Image (cartoon, rainbow, N blue to C red):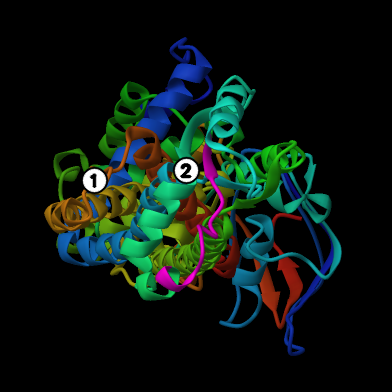
């Protein structure tokens, strides 16, 4: 599902985000990505979501060569990749419902279809009763679940999460991970960047370790 | 656990004509943009009024000019040709010539001023009656005042008519009193150009106002644009609400301009009527007709749309999610 062939990313100014990374993640895998901050975890995720482009090498997602993707094709690629952020990136002037509905509205679904799917996904993350609230009134864990709901509501085959449990206490982190495992069980390919080693060791999933932009360990291979 | 089990099964999309969905979505976005205007009524109103004032100035001047040109049009018809006959043409011959001219093409009316009448008029009006007493006999010729018909009252065709009349036997010379018509036309032409220049400048001002307003709106909605790009919103999708905002500004600005012009004309109406009454004229200000109002609003909407487009083209690419 996700292929990296000798991918390097050098930022303007000379900082090397990634150096010669090659990896392959199968469809339906759940993979952790770890390493110190600045090791290149976020860069790797950004290359998959096309928030950044590689300076060398080739990134392919679901058979699509991102190196050759034109600017106007980027939105359609992003619809196939759900993204979750540590800071949630919610819109605070809209209700939970409207936040989660955004990917469907963007994709042009009918109104009835949108509300049906949004309620279904809010039910899954346990926030159906809070659909009319504004995100600011929710706890950190709840906000993160809104972010997750938004990332999966359009049922993308790939979901990326960048430190999804970064600000949460262990119990809430566990809840989030349970959610991720459920998505994985229905076939979603998940790539989760985290430095929560305790969490990783408990779940026993394939783990990629980055160090200064290089892939130094791949537990699955 | 199995709540997600329906993942693999695609949800059958409700069959609806694409065009209707497209139309519905545009209507929704248009309404949402209108709602945004309504949510900050004071600043929206100020922007709309600025646009309205900027557009009402050239519109009002254009209308005044049109009125003045209309006035000029009625004067145009008053252009007349004076034919001075030779001294030895007697009263009978003058009558015959007048009869001949009456049947000529392009001639509407003939007024005969006999030598005696001319002398009388001259005595009364010139103040040289004493000097005339000193002369033997009447030095003045008989005059035929020819009023061209509607088809021959433009400067060019009146001139042609003059040449034709001048060639006639017994006519000493003819004079076409057109100078002032030409001057008047030259002045209105200058005024027309001035209004055009002013209109262009103020249209540019409206464009800049809209560009700036939309630019601020884009800045205010920075987070929203970023998230929309993140979840796969196309440029067209992101652009749309801002373009509609520009259209609304243009529409309401145009309507405001129309109202301002209407109000100004209404205020001018009775003084103008009084003035033209003093000149024994039935001239009155014509107010804005529907076609002018429609084109004013159309231009305004177009300016709003263009301004929004410029702002969006310039600033939307600056915002990229990171």
- Measured as percent of width and height from the top left, residue B2 is found at 38, 26
The part of the chain drawn in magenta is B133-147
Residue B4, placed above or below residue A12: above
CA distance separating discs 2 and 1: 38 Å
Residue B146 is one of the magenta-drawn residues:
yes
Is B195 left, or right, of A189 in this rendering? Answer: left
Residue at the spot x=49%, y=65% of the render?
B191
The C terminus of chain B: image quadrant: bottom right
Mark closer to the chain start, 2 or 1: 2
Quadrant location of residue A13? bottom right
Quadrant location of residue B5? top left
Q: Are marks 2 and 1 in contact (CB under 8 Å)?
A: no
Residue B183 visible in the current orientation: yes
Q: Residues within 10 Å of mark 2 (few under 14, many from 20)?
A: some
- Measured as percent of width and height from the top left, residue B8 is found at 53, 22
Camera-near label (2 vs 1) is 2
Residue B236 is one of the magenta-drawn residues:
no
Residue beneath label 1, please?
Answer: B284
Is A208 left, or right, of B238 in this rendering? Answer: right
Q: Nearer the viewer, residue A40 or B261?
A: B261
Residue beneath label 2, please?
Answer: B114
Residue B180, placed above or below residue A186: below
Looking at this rendering, what residue extends furthest in the bottom direction? A13
Q: Nearer the viewer, residue B19 or A154?
A: B19
Residue B278, placed above or below residue A163: above
Quadrant location of residue A46? bottom right
């Amino acid at each position: 599902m996700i292929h990296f062939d000798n991918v390097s990313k050098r930022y303007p100014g000379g900082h090397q985000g990634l150096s010669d990374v090659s990896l392959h993640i199968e469809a339906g895998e759940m993979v952790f990505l770890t390493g110190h901050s600045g090791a290149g975890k976020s860069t790797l995720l950004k290359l998959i979501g096309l928030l950044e482009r590689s300076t060398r090498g080739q990134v392919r997602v679901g058979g699509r060569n991102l190196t050759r993707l034109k600017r106007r094709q980027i939105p359609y690629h992003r619809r196939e990749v759900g993204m979750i952020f540590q800071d949630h990136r919610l819109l605070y002037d809209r209700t939970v419902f409207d936040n989660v509905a955004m990917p469907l509205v963007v994709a042009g679904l009918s109104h009835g279809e949108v509300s049906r799917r949004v309620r279904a996904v809010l039910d899954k993350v346990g926030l159906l009763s809070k659909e009319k609230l504004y995100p600011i009134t929710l706890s950190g864990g709840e906000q993160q679940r809104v972010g997750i709901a938004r990332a999966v509501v359009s049922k993308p085959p790939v979901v990326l999460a960048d430190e999804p449990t970064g600000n949460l206490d262990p119990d809430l982190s566990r809840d989030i991970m349970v959610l991720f495992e459920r998505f994985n069980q229905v076939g979603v390919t998940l790539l989760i960047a985290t430095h929560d080693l305790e969490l990783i060791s408990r779940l026993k999933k394939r783990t990629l370790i980055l160090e200064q932009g290089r892939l130094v360990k791949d537990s699955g291979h | 656990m199995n709540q997600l089990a329906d993942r693999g099964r695609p949800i059958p999309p409700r069959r609806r004509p694409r065009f209707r969905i497209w139309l519905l979505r545009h209507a929704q976005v248009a309404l949402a943009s209108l709602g945004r205007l309504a949510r900050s009524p004071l600043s929206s109103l100020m922007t709309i009024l600025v646009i309205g004032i900027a557009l009402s100035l050239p519109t009002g001047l254009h209308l005044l000019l049109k009125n003045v040109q209309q006035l000029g049009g009625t004067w145009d018809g008053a252009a007349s040709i004076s034919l001075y006959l030779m001294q030895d043409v007697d009263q009978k011959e003058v009558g015959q010539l007048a009869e001949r001219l009456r049947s000529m093409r392009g001639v509407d009316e003939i007024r005969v001023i006999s030598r005696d009448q001319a002398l009388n008029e001259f005595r009364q009006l010139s103040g040289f009656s004493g000097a005339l007493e000193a002369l033997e006999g009447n030095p003045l010729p008989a005059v035929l005042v020819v009023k061209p018909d509607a088809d021959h009252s433009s400067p060019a065709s009146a001139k042609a008519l003059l040449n034709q009349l001048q060639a006639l036997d017994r006519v000493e010379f003819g004079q076409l009193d057109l100078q002032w018509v030409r001057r008047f036309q030259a002045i209105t032409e200058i005024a027309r150009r001035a209004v055009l220049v002013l209109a262009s400048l103020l249209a540019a001002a409206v464009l800049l106002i809209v560009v700036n307003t939309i630019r601020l709106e884009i800045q205010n909605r920075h987070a929203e644009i970023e998230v929309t790009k993140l979840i796969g919103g196309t440029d067209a999708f992101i652009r749309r609400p801002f373009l509609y905002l520009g259209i609304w500004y243009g529409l309401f600005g145009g309507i405001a301009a129309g109202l301002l012009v209407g109000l100004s004309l209404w205020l001018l109406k009775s003084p103008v009527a009084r003035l033209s009454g003093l000149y024994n004229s039935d001239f009155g200000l014509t107010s804005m007709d529907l076609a002018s109002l429609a084109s004013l609003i159309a231009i305004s909407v177009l300016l709003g749309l263009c301004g929004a487009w410029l702002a969006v083209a310039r600033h939307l690419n600056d915002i990229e999610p990171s």
